[in-house]
Each structure stands twice: as structure tokens, then as C-alpha cells.
Image (tube, coloured by chain):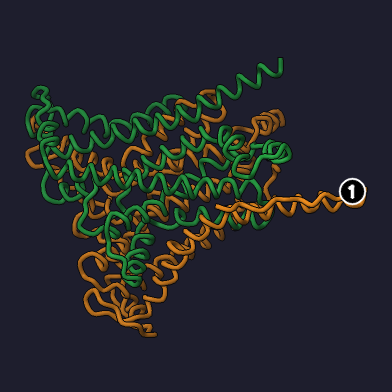
Chain colours: A orange, B green
Amino acid sequence: MNIVNNSEPIILGSQASHTRQRGKIDKKILSGYWLASPPLFFLVVFFLIPSVMLLVASFWTSKTFSMTPAATLANYARALSASGFYDSLWIALQNGFWTALLSTVISAPVAYYIVYRTRSNAVLYLALVSWFSSYLVRVYAWRSILGTNGVINSTLMHLGLVDQPLEWLVFSKFAVVLTLVHIMLPFTLLLLVSGLRDIKKDYLEASADLGASGATTLWRVIMPMAHKSIVSSFMFTFVLAASDYVTPQLLGGRDAMTTGLVIANQFRSVGNWPLGAAMAYLLLCVFMLVYALLLGVLRAANLAPGKRYHD
Amino acid sequence: MIRLFTYLYMFFLYAPIAIIALFSFHASASLSFPFEGFSTQWYEALFHSSDFMTALTNSAIVAAGSAILTTLLGTFSALALMRMKGRIKTAFAFMNFAPIALPGLFLGIALVIFFSLIGLPRSLLTVIIGHTLFTFPFFVESVRSRLEYFDLSFEEAARDLGASPLQAFWRVTLPIIGPTIAGAAILAVALSMDEFLITVFVTGSDTTLPLMILSMMRRAVSPTINAASVFMLVVTIAIIVIAGLVMTLRRRRLELERAETAE
């Protein structure tokens, strides 16, 4: 790999040394561009172009697994005219909303504890290790705990506390959200901790010295300064949970068809790729609407100042 | 109060994992307390299954391939980011991060359409590409903050003393950033071992460890799945812990060295 030809002409004199300095800076930045080109090439070929192709394909027509180029809005019209699409969207948004809300709210006190109460990073590291412990394994764990023949039900029946397995434990919205929260918690914790680390303890002490109660400090000092990390924690979790197609499939039962699952099925079993592509872009648009809505609500509630206080 | 809450939080994170680990050693096939004794029969069944060995081999190939590709591309990105400034740096950093800002589902279906339109048959190669798209942003993110403090004047000094750019990289930059890169590379292996949201779409007939567990889960409940899950868990956690140690040990050593020079 040719990084950059760095041979410098030898120039004498005071004015020349100024030019030499400039040339050096330019070269440094130029070599940055050269170095950026292999990853950029990879990202353009395998990320940008496929994303654009997905968009283009959403205007094509299809017959089981084969696509024909066209310029039609039929896929969008078909998706938007089916009531099943709205049902699946509603379930996906609910999964996303509850998972994001619960994960963020539950992780917040722990993030506070890690940043202000303890000096060790052990809790954070332990949580992160569990984040990297397979997603699928955790879905499976909840299924074997909540399932009809699972740990809770068989133990209850064994002890004679119930005659019939508790059906609502598994294959319900409860099971899906519980599992998704379990999966997302470490991720929200990481984002919240890095947000709180930017807020020095001095601010909290100053607020207390000036007579603010704990709640006032939380609401008037921490929230405005941490709102960026709270919003990103909520939004990332929302998008990941709402578009998930495996947890609803394995734990959600028949009524838990989410848009992600509908899209995945278009690609795996049904074979109408353009329709799936159109639904994927519709889902992305909905996510962006949710994001705009969230920012609007926070601004209206006066929790999202335009600028950061600490810089 | 808040300490108790934190302990409960950790309990919630680890209890389900502990339960399936426990039942993977259960003597009977039932998932019920009280426990009926320990046995390693499910692990024996697992390691004698040829499906499992194939899936394991495939996962290892994919993890190695995508980790190598990720490390190559990610190191270029890291070196580029150290040299960039201002808006271009922000844009390039965003571009590096973008693939994981989107759901895995989206990446999976975009790649399926792309591979089919360019006529690349789905195989382990396409899985490696898909995984790299997912591991590369994590690699760059985990390396970036640690390399912010890298002093480019070391390189410049080497260049002034007559080293070629490659020599300067090999003899000066790499020894300094090496452990960070190694830690992130191991992280990429762990991420790839676990990945299945993209894999489901970009694989042909090849199965990986998570895909095998997924299809076992669809078919039946069997304690062999517990054993397979626990096996995968142990592998990824071991990898993560190694990655963490590589990265922190290096930092400790640097801090020690700095303390010594300060004296």
C-alpha cells in the first residue's frame, strides 16, 4: 500500500520555512485521506451501494424470488393498504417503546451509582460482559424459564401450586419486552455512563450547596446536561427492539408479528423482495418520525436545551 | 438503596444465564426444580454431533476471516482518523459508525439484494463480508478514543531520521497502538461468533453456531440446546475477558512507565 510520497524539497530561508510548515500539515491531512481510502471503499461497496440498491429495488416488481426492474409505487401502496402492516407496526412500536423506556429508566440509577458512588469499574465491566454474551442464548434462556415446560411452570406444577401451566408467561407481549429489556440493559447502561461521566461531581455539589434538593438537582442539573445520552440510549434501544425479528418470533406467539418479522419473511420464505424492501424503508421513515417526535416532546417539556452547558 | 438496586440489576442480568448453565448439567431432560442430579450427557451428545462440529468450524472460519478483514480496514481507519481534522473527520467517523446505527435486519436484506444483483453466490465469503460490516464499526469505536492521545510527532521524528512511511509505521506506530488493535480484533472475533441477524440472510447452505442453535430452538426443546448455548457463552465470554485484559494490561503498563519517567 502506497501511503504517500513524502519526499520534501530542501528550501532555505525564513519565508521558505513557513511554506515548509504548511506543506507538512497538508501532507499529514493528505496521508489521512490515503489511509481512509480502503475502509471507505469497503463501506461504499458493501454498505452504501447495497442500501441504495435496496431503495431502488423497492420500486421494482417481483415474482417469487426474481425481481424485474420497474418504477412503480405498487409495493408501497400494497404495504400501506394492508391492515396487517399497521398491526405489525403497532406491535413493533410498542415493543420498541416499552423496551427503550424500561431499559433506560432501570439503567439510570445503576449508571449514577457507577459514576458517582463507586470508583471501581467492576459493575460496568460485568454488565458489558453480559452484553456480549450471545443475544440468542439470552432469548433461549428466557424461553426455557418462561415456557410452558419451562423452569417456572414445571416447578410450580411440581410443587402442586398450579394444575395448568401459566400460559401468559410465554408467547406474550410481556415475555417479549422482558427479554428485550434483558438484552438491551447493558447497552443503555454503557451509553448513560458515558453521558454522566461528562458531568463533573462539582456541579452536583454546587447545586446541593445552593440549597437544591436531590430531585431538583436531578431535574434541573443532571437531566439537561445528560439529555443527549438519554436520548441516544432511548433511540438506539428503540430502533433495535422495534426492528427485532427473532425475539418476537421465538417468544411472542402468533399475535406478535412485528414489521421486522414480516420483512424478514419476505426475504426468507415468501420471496417478494421488492415488497420487503419497501416495508424496510417505511419502517426507517417511521423510526425517523419517532425520533423527531421525541425531540419535540423533550423540547416542549423544557428538558432539551439547545446547547450543552459543559464544554 | 442504590447499591442494593445495582446488585438486583446484576442479578437480573446473570440469573437467566446461570439457570440455563445449571440445567445444561441436569441429569434428566426436564427443566424443573428440584434438581435430579448432575450429568455431562448433553455435552457428550453435542460434541458427538457432526452438525455441531460443522457449525463450529464454519463459525471459526467466519470469525477469523471477518476479524482479519476488520483489523486491516479498522487500522487504516484509525490511522486516518488520527490525521484528520474538523468536518471531514466528523463525516468519516460517522461513515464508519453508520452500519451499526441501522438494524441488522436492514443490513442483511440490503446485502442479499446486492449479492444477488452482482451474481455473487451466497457462501461463507458473503457471511464474512456481512460480519465485517457489523464488526468494523465496533472495532473503530473501541480503538478511536484510545488513539486520540497518540502523538503523531513520534512518527514525524522517525520520518525525519530517515525512516520510510512503512518503516515508521512498523517500528514506531505499531508497537504503540498494537495492544489496542489486538484487543479490538479479539472483540471482533467475539462479535462475529455471536452474529446471526445478518447471517440468516447472507448465508447459503452453510450453518454457523448461532444459526444451528436457532434452528434447534425452532424444532424442539432439548437440553442439548442448553449445552450448545453454554458452550457458545463460555467461548464468547472467554474471548471478551481476554480482549479486556489485553487492553487494560497495556494501559497499566503505560501508566507505570509514565509514573517512572515522571520520577
Query: Label 1 is found on which chain of the structure?
Result: A
Does residue A236 lie above or below A195 as drawn? below
Q: What residue do we see at 31% from left, 79% from top?
A: A78
Q: To which quarter of the image does residue B199 belong?
A: bottom left
Q: Secondary structure at mark 1?
A: loop
Instruction: From the viewer's perspective, tell me whether residue A245 is left or right of residue B172.
Output: left
Q: To which quarter of the image does residue B16 belong?
A: top left
Q: What residue do we see at 49% from left, 56% from top?
A: B98
Give the residue type that dot 1 points to: Leu
- Residue with the most extreme right position: A14
Q: Which residue is mark 1?
A: A12
Q: Position of residue B243 (x, y in %)?
A: 43, 32
Instruction: From the viewer's perspective, tell me whether residue B95 is left or right of residue B28.
Output: right
Q: Nearer the viewer, residue A19 or A90?
A: A19
Q: What residue do we see at 78% from left, 53% from top?
A: A23
Label tally = 1
* Label 1 crowd (10 A; few <14 / some 14-19 / many >=20): few
Q: To which quarter of the image does residue A102 belong?
A: top left
- Residue with the most extreme bottom position: A71
Instruction: From the viewer's perspective, tell me whether residue B47 is left or right of residue B98.
Output: left
Instruction: From the viewer's perspective, tell me whether residue B26 is left or right of residue A105.
Output: left
Q: What residue do we see at 23% from left, 34% from top?
A: B231
